Amino acid sequence: MQNKIKELKSILGEVSDLNYASAVLGWDQQTYMPSGGAEGRGRQLATLARLAHIRFTSDEVGQLLEDLEPYAEQLPADSDDARLIKVTRREYDKSTKVTSEWVSDFANETTLGQSVWEKAREKSDFSMFQPNLEKIIALRRQYAEFFAPYDHVYDPLLDDFEPGLKTAEVKEIFDNLRPKQVELIQAISEKPQVDDSFIHLEFPDQKQWDFGEKVISDFGFDWNRGRQDKTAHPFTTSFGLDDVRITTRVITNLGGSALFSTMHEAGHAMYEQGFPASLGRTPLANGASMAVHESQSRMWENLVGRSYAFWTYYYPILQAFFPSQLGNVDLETFYKGINKVEPSLIRVESDEATYNLHIMLRLELEIAMMEGSLAAKDLPEAWNDRMNSYLGITPQNDRVGVLQDVHWSGGMIGYFPTYALGNLVSTQLWESIQKDLPDLEEQIAKGHFGELLGWLRDKIHRHGAKFEPQELVQQVTGSKIDAASYVRYLNKKYKAIYNL
Amino acid sequence: MQNKIKELKSILGEVSDLNYASAVLGWDQQTYMPSGGAEGRGRQLATLARLAHIRFTSDEVGQLLEDLEPYAEQLPADSDDARLIKVTRREYDKSTKVTSEWVSDFANETTLGQSVWEKAREKSDFSMFQPNLEKIIALRRQYAEFFAPYDHVYDPLLDDFEPGLKTAEVKEIFDNLRPKQVELIQAISEKPQVDDSFIHLEFPDQKQWDFGEKVISDFGFDWNRGRQDKTAHPFTTSFGLDDVRITTRVITNLGGSALFSTMHEAGHAMYEQGFPASLGRTPLANGASMAVHESQSRMWENLVGRSYAFWTYYYPILQAFFPSQLGNVDLETFYKGINKVEPSLIRVESDEATYNLHIMLRLELEIAMMEGSLAAKDLPEAWNDRMNSYLGITPQNDRVGVLQDVHWSGGMIGYFPTYALGNLVSTQLWESIQKDLPDLEEQIAKGHFGELLGWLRDKIHRHGAKFEPQELVQQVTGSKIDAASYVRYLNKKYKAIYNL
């Protein structure tokens, strides 16, 4: 069996190398590639993806899994090898159940969809994109059928991002959360608004960049095993456990600025930098799920980076970076300003109190479309109705409404809920951390993050993708993913800011 | 047959994609990769190289070649398909004749050799590196045996870089050249030296960078299909016909500066940018040989970039970039200064008049080691003797002598002559260009390079690797590679500068 597991790891290592190579090519595509390189790069990425797919879905891997599964059952259930075999089986089945015809159709439709969406968005005209969305939904239904029987047609899609999680679970979590968030926003809206005018001043790019890098260096981002570059949209990508890169976008004011995006991506990256070498070049060298990944990024961005404790230490430093912009803005004003709650049309610009409502809206629409109860043509109206009932505002056009996000044109249905779930997991973990590190807030107020990162390394990072998200959250916090801690967190935070 | 040629191209395209992916990973490794990424990157590159090798040397390719060769004979000899089949056969035989055991031994020995050489160089102690060099030479002899029978044991090595060229031809060319270069240097040494003190002033990095980019933009380097980054050693690399990248090193004076290195690499890059789309993703999307490649880089660097005509136009611009350094240096002084001849120990820092002698010395030593007439242990003495007789100077230690270049520790025996041959080809082409473009010098003196680049595109670039170097040079200039034009060029240039 030792030979077979070695053989399996050797194939998985080869597949990892191909995927990491793709990641390098993808990173370069978004950071430095000259425009002329696009066509060739597309072909290179297609070749690498095809070779990785062929190798991973080979009969050889199927046979090795069959041979190794009885052996895995004799191992401790949470041993690396047992989990590797389990996770590989899961991905192998996923990759082999789907026909190559579907894969090719889907690639074509989403490539086309993407370019049509871009034009439709520019013209703010959903009807241009509607036929493409219809095809994408049809393909996604077909995809679900590969995994029949299922409890819910949305389950197989969700499972791609949240292994083991069911639609019914997510619905229940969100059903608990929604009224409480709506209620909070309502309460806030009745209070006088905070002043965030300083956010809209001019903050020179390089100084924002330097401050961001100082902060994430303090967090524990390892520059020997990572770097930061500029892109149109921030992201994190890994070329192995020892080369994890983040990108950021610098705009000249503090709204949606490099600062919080750098902390966010560093949260993702420190997760990836925390996988142990023993899991390297296997499918376990991944986050447990997108929600768990997002819990890390949102924790560093929000629970740390938008906290009062954090700014008691960093605000004087930030003021020293930007004396003319912030010299006359006191800490209280600054803290309230960066935490201003204001229902807005655009998800990626929304604050902590309203963000999840944007997600819930999308999830409901996705589910309805997958179930067939909502036709693509009726989507803009359904979107606008919900925006109005959850946030009290109505998009003036499709561009800032139903066409704002890239996900649907790219076929990424099932992804949205992971953003909100990540928020919930972040506060669930936070409550556990506070129990284990009672002086956490004092540490943060001194710019000390070593114990926090150590806790995350020990409880979350070192497991990579060994555990499913519900399993991991249960193991670390004592309960599955739920909304209670997040509601407590929001209420406490905004009570102080808005005198609720 | 159309199906078979299509099939062959499809496999070659896949191999190209893998090789281009390797090139991206290699570029990133030298430009932006954090230090921690080295180990993983090594594995990824090994995996990509192995997969490309397996695919290219597959029986399928062998069979397709056998099936296609009779068909190729019916095609016009210089048609793309006929040449593709011929070149692919050549590379296929090269790749399949060598045992995988040798490939693995060679990879191990040269990796080791590289790291030992670095230490030996640092300590300036050749004896540390001697055992490694012995093994590398032995492996290189073994390599030659895979291609027995040969006229000369050095032929198979040379052939890797200069397809079809024989050691005897190179020897003859160099035998003609050597006495004339020695004589010229002797004559120069008897004249008063020129003043190049301005070169050693401080030239701010960013301005050097900007000036270099301005110049190569004027040359015709296509920024939509390329870019420039910084590395420790300048190089050119391609990720396809539409993404060709150069790198440069910026040091704060003009000696070995970014300026000439940028022009040099742009010469390589414009060659690669000039391959026609029809040759894309095949082995024909390459330079005809390393010497032909070097003829392009040296032409733009030296025949253009160190010419009087060039600086009549660009010197005022350069002065505007560096008023405090060059404001009081007149054009004559500048031109003579950047063309100063001075026998020196280091090849990469040597001037046009002495450069080839560095190469000839290395070639003679390589041949002697391959023939077995020179033992590795006697190499430093042989090196120093020749330095003394060709250039009249003796290295004070191994570091600035026999250990200065990376090539031998990397097993790259057979490569050195291509540098000097490139110089010769550059002037051979130049004489042909001058016939076709009688006002070439006036054009350069106006900063116009369109006709020059157009000529190169038409006569050299568009053929890619369709022709062997001797074939191509013959076709374009009417004679094979020879030294006469280079001697004419050197004599004319230095006669003016040194009043010979």
Image: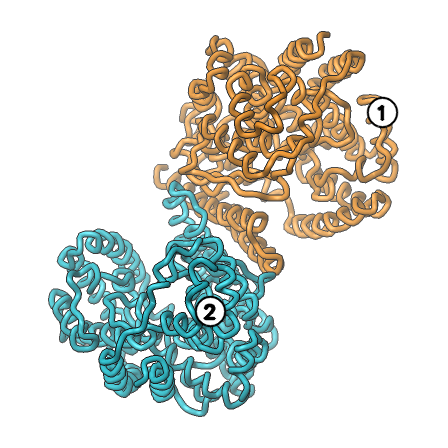
Chain colours: A orange, B cyan
Amino acid residing under circle 2: His
Of tags 1 and 2, which is closer to the observer? 2
Q: Quadrant of residue A337?
A: top right
Q: Using the image as rendered, state which of residue A427 and residue A74 is in the foreground.
A: A427
What percent of the width, then of the height, locates residue B100? 32, 61
Provide the residue designation for mark 2: B268
Binning the other alpha carbons within 10 Å of mark 2 as few (below 14), some (14 to 19) or many (20 upward) gives many
Discs 1 and 2 share one subunit = no
Pinpoint the chain carrying mark 1: A
Q: How many marks?
A: 2
What percent of the width, then of the height, locates residue B91? 41, 72
Binning the other alpha carbons within 10 Å of mark 1 as few (below 14), some (14 to 19) or many (20 upward) gives few
What percent of the width, then of the height, locates residue A440? 49, 13
Above/below status of A483 relative to B134: above
What percent of the width, then of the height, locates residue B458? 56, 81
SS label for mark 2: helix
Provide the residue designation for mark 1: A388
Q: Is residue A170 left or right of residue B366?
A: right
Amino acid residing under circle 1: Asn
Q: Quadrant of residue A493?
A: top right
Q: Is residue B402 left or right of residue A461?
A: left
Q: Using the image as rendered, state which of residue B193 and residue B37 is in the foreground.
A: B193
Above/below status of B391 relative to B226: below
SS label for mark 1: helix
Above/below status of B102 relative to A71: below
Above/below status of B8 relative to A350: below
Quadrant where the C terminus of chain B sits is bottom left
- Does residue B298 show up? no
Residue drawn at 58 percent across, 38 percent down: A205
Residue drawn at 85 percent across, 37 percent down: A397
**Residue lying furthest front in this view?**
B328
